[in-house]
Amino acid sequence: MLDHKLIFYNLHVNTIMIKILDIGCRYGVFPKFRNSYKSFEYIGVDADENEIKRLKKKYHSKKNIKFFSAFLGSKNKKVIFKIYKHKGYSSSHNINKKSLWFGKIRKNESSILSKKKINCIKSGEWINKNLSGKLILKLDIEGGELDFLKGLETKNFNNIEAIVAETHFENPFKSNSNFGSIFSYLSKKGYWLVDMDINYENLSVYGIGNSDKIPHAATSIFLKKNYSQIKYENKEIEIKCQTLYVLNLYAQLIDMIKYYGYSKIKNFKIFNKIKFICAHRFNFLKNNPHFSHNSLNKDFKKIFKENLPKHSKFYENSFYNPD
């Protein structure tokens, strides 16, 4: 029975669609998802009630988006939630002024504006009560990422296809959540690291270029190990393709659909979106001396049962160049 759970805008009655669960959704839709979120159910959760009220007004016309105010962690308890001068740092954890981030780079942004005692709900319990189906989980909760993960149950991990997490290479907050601890924990849960968007900072006024910058944090993407190209599994293919599409992992997506072929993907809800991305990637690769139009067209035809338009015909095609 799902009548007690969140029922969203029905995007495609006969298709199981991945959902995006954004924990720490301050400022709205996460940049990684801006190209794809309109095609999926998007659930944003943040502990700041005022921010949730603002987001509900901002996205009120979007039927596929819901926002909820909740603080989620490893167990049910009371926590002191702090709103910092830079509201993006709001957390139950204290700032670590001995870290490079708050000790040097952002040392003037650590003052507290207000404090409030709120309920922390065990993350797995909240998901079980409010959601069903396959998820992409995004975590950016200022030192609380590992605590959230530890609140999940086996059934939750079974449904989480991918995790996008803010991971620091030090501890800007007084917590045990950092890249090393998150990587270790998720590896044991059957996930592998597939992508990192690393943020660098120049600590010295004498720095020249990127070689003098240090990596301080990264947006890290973890996929279930059954996405590995070593051996594709012949199940939940559409969910896997949706996941790679949402995460902009287009090369892996193309490898996957090439392996499965047209007969397996032709009825996918996002078939045309995949075809659009694949065509533009192939059109770009034609400039690579390792490829030719004929070789790329051979692969394209195998996947989509049609030819890849050549030269000006590609740009004159209203499907591939709609605007």
Image (cartoon, grey):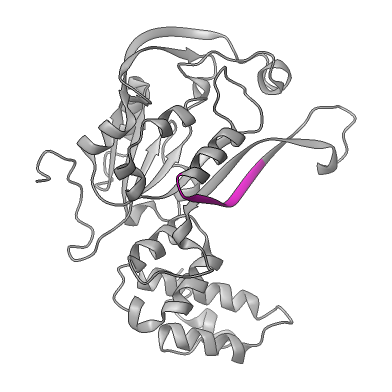
Q: Is residue 70 above or below residue 226?
A: above
Q: Position of residue 89 (x, y in %)?
A: 52, 22
**Residue at x-position 38% and y-position 83%:** 262
Q: Position of residue 14 (x, y in %)?
A: 18, 66
Give the quarter of the image for residue 233. Answer: bottom left
Q: Position of residue 269 (x, y in %)?
A: 30, 68
- Inspect this view and state whether residue 82 appears: yes
Q: Position of residue 323 (x, y in %)?
A: 46, 68
Q: Is residue 90 above or below residue 159?
A: above
- Inspect this view and state whether residue 24 appears: no
171 with respect to 16 (left or right) = right
Per the image, is 80 magenta?
no
Depth check: give the residue in front, 196 or 208.
196
Depth check: give the residue in front, 218 or 125.
125
Give the quarter of the image for residue 211. Answer: top right
**Residue at x-position 62% and y-position 22%:** 172
Give the quarter of the image for residue 156. Answer: top left
Q: Which residues are magenta?
A: 189-198
239 with respect to 105 (left or right) = left
Q: Is residue 205 above or below residue 107?
A: below
